Amino acid sequence: MPESRINLISTGIPVLITDGTQTGVYLYLDSVKSNGIAKIITRWNFTEERQTNESDNTEYTKYTYQEAWIAWSLPGFYTKDGVITQLGTTDENGCRVITEEQVKNYITANAVEIAGFGQTSKLRYVG
C-alpha cells in the first residue's frame, strides 16, 4: 500500500453520493495531455497511524491508502443537473484549450463515475 506523511485527503476532490454523503474516496488531477486525456489518481481506504522517527524521537502521522492511476478522456461537453457545460474553448489555431479549473469542475461533477472506474478497472495509466 502506498503511504505518505501528507494528509492527502485535504488536497483531493471528495467523491460524494447524490445526498452529499462522503464515500472516503478522493480524486486528484495529475495532468492533462494536449489530446484531452487526463491522468487522474483515485485514492481510497485511507488510514492514519502515529509513528516515531527513530533518529530523533519525533512523532509524525503516516497515512496509508489504496490508489489507481487512470487515463480519462475529457469530453467537449458534459451535463450535470440538467446544465450543459462546454469543457474548454478553441484558440485561433483550432487547438482545444482547457483550464485546470474547468477540468477540476468536470471531475467534481462526474466524480462517482470516474472513481468507480478507477477502483474497478484493470486498465492503468501508462506514461
Image (spheres, rainbow, N blue to C red):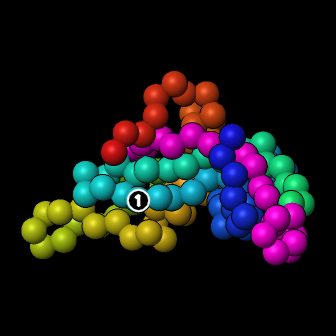
Q: Residue at x 82, y 75 (%)?
A: 56
Q: Is residue 43 above or below residue 108?
A: above
Q: Quadrant of the N terminus?
A: top right
Q: Helix, strand or loop at disc 1?
A: strand
Q: Residue at x 61, y 53 (%)?
A: 27
Can you identify the residue that label 1 sits on? 31
User: Percent position (x, y) of residue 100?
Assistant: 44, 69
Q: Is residue 25 visible?
A: no
Q: Quadrant of the C terminus?
A: top left
Does residue 107 belong to the magenta stretch? Answer: no
User: Percent position (x, y) of residue 113?
Assistant: 60, 39
Q: Residue at x 54, y 27 (%)?
A: 121
User: Percent position (x, y) of residue 75?
Assistant: 38, 48
Q: Amino acid at mark 1?
A: Ser
Which contiguous range is marked in magenta?
52-74
| Residue at the extreme front | 55
Q: Residue at x 51, y 58 (%)?
A: 29
Task: Choose top left, top right, bottom left or bottom right for residue 66.
Answer: top right
Q: How many marks?
A: 1
User: Is residue 73 found left or right of 103 in the rendered image?
Assistant: left
Q: Along the line of sight, which residue is nearer the eye, 111 or 11?
A: 11
| Residue at the extreme left | 93
Q: Main secondary structure of the magenta part?
A: strand
